[in-house]
Amino acid sequence: MNKQRRKDLSRIESQLEDLRDDLESLRDEEEEYYENIPENMAESDRAYAAQEAVDKLNDAVDYLNDAIIYVEEAQA
């Protein structure tokens, strides 16, 4: 791999890390929201939606972590 492609991959890796960090922040906010739902609303649609969002954001973070690893390996 030439120097320019390595540089491009490094830039993309940095962008992926920034996106992952943003998703983690949003996930943490949604998780905090979910944890602070009053007990009498724990079975509500809103609570289920919040938990589902947290689960999906966890998945997205995992996929971005995988993508970062693949980009790192491609640069080797």
Image (cartoon, rainbow, N blue to C red):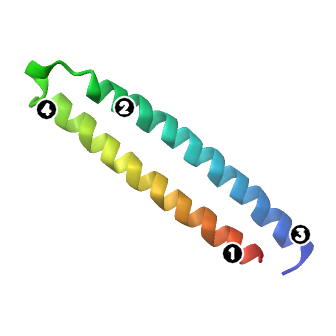
Nearer to us: label 2 or label 3: 2
Q: Residue furthest bottom?
A: 1
In this view, the mark in front (2 or 4): 2
Name the residue located 71 percent from the left edge and 76 percent from the top edge. 74
Residue 17 point in image, percent of width and height: 64, 50
Upstream in sequence: badge 4 or badge 3:
3
68 or 39: which is nearer to us?
39
Residue neighbourhood size for the residue with mark 1, other residues' Cα within 10 Å, grouped as few (<14), some (14–19), many (≥20): few
Judged from the image, the secondary structure of the residue bearing numbered disc 3 is helix
* Amino acid of disc 2: Glu
**Which quarter shows the N terminus?**
bottom right
Three-letter code for the amino acid on which mark 3 is drawn? Gln
Q: Which residue is mark 3?
A: 4
Residue assigned mark 1: 73
Mark 2 highlights which residue?
30
Tag 1: residue type? Glu
Q: Quadrant for residue 4, please give it.
A: bottom right
